[in-house]
Each structure stands twice: as C-alpha cells, then as structure tokens.
Image (cartoon, rainbow, N blue to C red):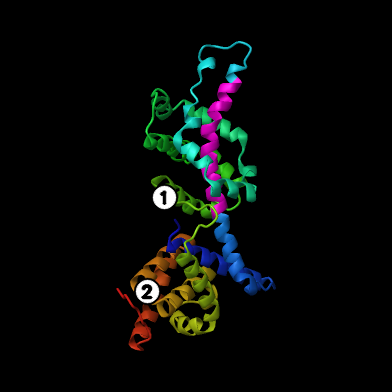
Amino acid sequence: MISRRNIRVKVMQTLYTLASMEHSGQNGTGNASKLLDDKLDHVLDIFTVSVLYTLRIAQYAETDAANRSSKYLRSNEDLNVNTSIAENSFVVKMLRNESFNEKIRKDKLERFIDQEWVKKIYLQLAKSEAYSNYTTKKEHTPAEDKDIIRHIWEQEILTNENIIAHFTDELPGWEDDSELIIMLMQNFFNGKSKVNFFNLLSGEKKEYAHELLNVVQEKAEYCMELIGPKLKNWDKDRVALIDLLLLRMGVCELLYFPTIPTKVTINEYIDIAKQYSTPQSGQFVNGVLDNILKDLLKENKIKKTDRQ
C-alpha cells in the first residue's frame, strides 16, 4: 500500500530526527532502525484511525435511531430512522476483520475517536444527497455499500475544515502524514491490495527501507566526499539539512541499489526536495545529483541491472 517514495520520505525524516538528536548531544544512531519502524507504525496508527472514524460515523445511524425513538414526543420520522448504512456489507466486513480489530485493541486507537465529531459528521451526512439516495433504496450492491463509506471519508470528512483542524490538533502525526494517509485511504477504497493492519510494508519494501537507512549512515563520509566538491557555488553552511540528507540518500541509491534506475532516483529526490524543503531545493538537488552521476558514470562506478 505504501510506495517507495513514501519510504524515502520516512527514511529522510528518520535521518533528520537522528541529526537533530546528535545536534542536541543525544546519540540515537543505535536506535535508527527502531526509530524508522516507529515512524512507519505511526502512519499505520493514523490510517487505522481514519478507517475507524468512517465506520463509527456510519454506525452512528443506530445511535441516532435509538436517541430519536426514546424522545418523549416522537414523530413518525423519529420512529423510522433508516439504519441500513450501519449494517451495510462493507461495514460488517471491516468490523469482522481480525487484524483491524486487534490493531485497535492493542494500540488503544479508540481513544482518538471523538464522539461529538462522529455525531456532527453523521448529521452532516444525513443531509446529503448521497445519503438520501442510498437510504431510499431497499437493497444495495457491495459496490454501493463501499461507495457510501467512501463518501463519508472523501466528502464529509476531508472537505470539512473543522474536523481536519481537529485532526491536526488531536491526532499526532496527521499534519506531517496527511498526504500519505489520504493516498492510503484512496488505495484502501480502491481495493488495490489486501490490508494487513499490523504491517504497512511488504517484506521487500521493509528490507528496502532499512537497507537505505543503514547504507546512508554507513556511507555518510564517502557520500560527503562526493557531494562536497559540488557545493563550491553554494554556501555549504547554509545548505538546508534536508537537502544534504536527500543528496546522501540519492548518492547511495545511485551506487548501492542496482535495481533502481538512475533517472528514477534523481526524479524522486527532486520531487521530495520540492515538497519538504525550500523553494530552490528541487533545482539544487537536481543539479548536484546530476553532476555526481556524470562523474560516477565516467569512473564506471554505476552498476545497474536495469538502467534507464
């Protein structure tokens, strides 16, 4: 579910945290792999909470029905609240998913669900045309059941600035990882892969993540020997730390990851620099990596099994 670009970002964030710890006198090198795993696990926590929010909002239909039927003065509408969304096939399937339930229980993720927000979003949902169309049908296909839950996430949650602000304030990591979470949720609803709520990465991608982190640490001195001369037109002391980390990561991919084409490596780190560093960082990373690549090619140091 998670792409190599997402992994590169998590490795970059791990290296940045380690550099910050070193700057403050702490030694986090020995815990680098654990720190990376923690960052990946935290993404999985937020993703799971996002799924859980959509389900709890759908389930609130039953709470709403119970509340309205217990009113002293009840209208016919109060006595006939449609609860089909709470019992639809997609909701039932997810609530029976063992890894999903165990993840919620093990990491106590229910604590992040604010019942007032669940109620607010449900009441907002109940006024929507999509909900009206769904509840007026007596029977639904599995695709229709999934679509109404997707609607909750995409149209009722993501478009609501107030609940997104709540996520930013109360859901640790949302601000940093929201783009990744949105991508994971999109893949989740598209059903592109089976979700294991205990493992965000396949074995191959996890190996890549840890190998990249370890190689960048081990080859730090050599990478800086290659990078340093290319900074002659730049004030080295003013180069953003993130840019230097991305350059080290890029050089390591060029040299030590034979199955990743050089063009892919350079383009990926340009895009990450544009997104996570300064406005000039994309151009800077492009220029430096391109110059280093030319030197390495001349010296026949680039060994790719599938070069592009």
In screen coordinates, is 261 left or right of 213?
left
In the image, residue 175 lies in the stretch drawn in magenta: no
Query: Residue visible at 46% across and 25% down?
Result: 127
Q: CA distance from mark 1 to mark 2?
A: 25 Å
Main secondary structure along the magenta-highlighted residues:
helix
Pick the quarter of the image with the N terminus: bottom left
User: Which residue reaches farthest right?
Assistant: 25
Q: Is residue 169 left or right of residue 150?
A: right
User: Which residue is at the front of the view, 228 or 3?
Assistant: 3
Q: Quadrant of residue 275?
A: bottom left
Nearer the N terminus, badge 1 or badge 2? 1
Quadrant hosting residue 293: bottom left
- Foreground: 240 or 108? 108
Q: Residue at x 60, y 61 (%)?
A: 38
Answer above or below: position of 5 versus 128.
below
- Relative vertical location of residue 172 with respect to residue 276 in this rendering, above or below: above
Residue assigned mark 1: 187
* SS assignment at label 2: loop
The label on residue 207 is none
Rendered view: 174 above or below 34: above
In the rendered structure, find residue 259 and report the number of the disc placed on it: 2
Image height of 57 relative to 206, above or below: above
Amino acid type at image mark 1: Asn
**Span highlighted in magenta in the image:** 44-67
Q: Is residue 56 magenta?
A: yes
Question: Horizontal and vertical percent for residue 205?
Answer: 46, 65
Circle 2 Cα neighbour tier, 10 Å, few/some/many (<14 / 14–19 / ≥20): few
Report the amino acid beneath label 2.
Thr
Q: Residue at x 53, y 41 (%)?
A: 96
